[in-house]
Amino acid sequence: MQLLAFGLNHQTAPLNIRERVAFHADRLESALRDFVHSGRVKEAAILSTCNRTEVYCNAVDHTAALDWMADYHQLSPQILQPYLYAMPAAEAARHAFRVASGLDSMVLGETQILGQMRDAVRVAEKAGTLGVMLHKLFQQTFAVAKDVRTTTEIGASSVSMAAAAVRLAERIFPDIADQKVLFVGAGEMIELCAAHFCARKPREVMVANRTLSRAHALADRYQGTAIELNELPEYLGNFDIVVTCTASPLPILGKGMVERALKARRHRPIFMVDLAVPRDIETEVAELADVFLYTVDDLGAVVQQGRDNRQAQVGQAEQIIEASLQEFRHWLDMREVVPAIRNLRDHGERVRRHEMERAMKLLARGEAPEQVLEQLSRSLTNKFLHHPTQALHNAGDEERQDLLTFLSRIYPLHPDS
């Protein structure tokens, strides 16, 4: 049994691969139970975002654990192998610390990933797949992330995906205040985008979502209107800016729908940002002359603009992570000796119980308590020291010296002893 982290992210895999192994939020609990019930792991948590899909687990068989992801998504392991990374034990912990601290994100120092990791842990707890090892890992991970963010300026001058989307829109339209904005979805990413775009006071705001009540809740914050997803074809042509991020496993904005919207607009341009993984907008939409379509990967160049200001803080953040990693590594090492400690204590308890029973019998026969206690203490001493003494007698010259050194560390022996 060993801690293992594996997966793929924006650095190792293109979007068309990442979207094939993304875990739908509605199926995440069942996926976790499937993984644990397969017998390949004892514990598991899955972090699935637009930029990464990672599995943290207490693995029985590392190879079998890695193959599970391909099996679950009905993919050949050979397809995923070039893009996967796998990190055991302390290396996995270091990776978790860096991810939560924003050091492994497309946007250095971004904070959204920490909330996403907390959500992943909550889902694992609900699924019953979070055990002692992962609980300890994530407990320390969140403590490290808090330390990094409060003692460094790693998040200063932050550029989020939402802010990057606004920057790109401002390259197309001189003033967002003159534009109409449509948000498709009502999750956390859309909420962030709405906050950034609506700060520019657009002319009109609409939210489309599968659950109309959630669409209304978000739209009401910005004096907007709400519609259901099936009404998109009717309203799409009214909007200059479309930002989408839903959990749909299939695209919801097809090329045909967008072509009809452009015709209704008399080919006035539409700026579209697809932040969903899997994608909400068909890739063919990018071929249309009057559409400016950007995906999460396209935003990468924009979000790097704030990187230089934060890069100077990386060294200090890494020092915090390394210090915490030593503590976690020690905890892992101690877990490895727990069975031996338990066996040693069980042995000592058996000896104690046996000698105690003998002493009680002697007392019941009327033996003097002082003599019984003396005999009890001598017997316990002899039995506890029998095995180390015998090992010294039977050891060869080189082994004997090692044993003496070892015993001197265990027992407070004087040098002249």
Image (cartoon, rainbow, N blue to C red):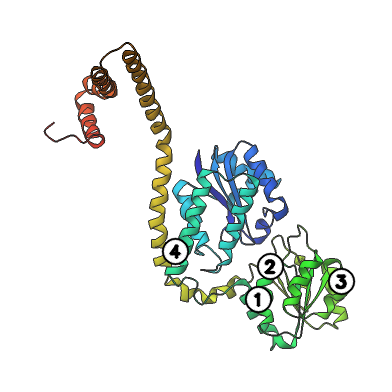
Q: Position of residue 390 (x, y in %)?
A: 25, 20
Q: Position of residue 344 (x, y in %)?
A: 37, 29
Query: Residue at horizontal 42%, vertical 69%?
Result: 151
Helix, strand or loop at label 2? It is loop
Helix, strand or loop at label 1? It is helix
Chain-order first, disc 4 or disc 3: 4
Chain-order first, disc 4 or disc 1: 4
Marks 4 and 3 in Cβ contact (< 8 Å): no
Q: Is residue 79 left or right of residue 402?
A: right
- Pointer 4 residue: 147
Q: 10 Å neighbourhood of mark 4: few (<14), some, or many (≥20)?
A: some
In the displayed structure, would residue 402 be above or below residue 80?
A: above
- Pointer 3 residue: 233
Q: Is residue 364 shown to the viewer in this render?
A: yes
Query: Residue at horizontal 23%, vertical 34%?
Result: 411
Marks 3 and 2 in Cβ contact (< 8 Å): no
Q: Amino acid at mark 1?
A: Ala
State how far apart marks 3 and 1 are (Cα).
Answer: 23 Å
- Pointer 2 residue: 275
Q: Depth-wise, is mark 4 or mark 3 nearer the camera?
A: 4
State how far apart marks 2 and 1 are (Cα).
Answer: 10 Å
Q: Amino acid at mark 3?
A: Pro
Q: Position of residue 36 (x, y in %)?
A: 62, 40
Q: Depth-wise, is mark 2 or mark 4 nearer the camera?
A: 4
Chain-order first, disc 3 or disc 2: 3
Q: Amino acid at mark 4?
A: Asp
Q: Which mark is residue 165?
A: 1
In the displayed structure, would residue 390 be above or below residue 85?
A: above
Marks 2 and 1 in Cβ contact (< 8 Å): yes
Marks 2 and 4 in Cβ contact (< 8 Å): no
Q: Is residue 295 shown to the viewer in this render?
A: no
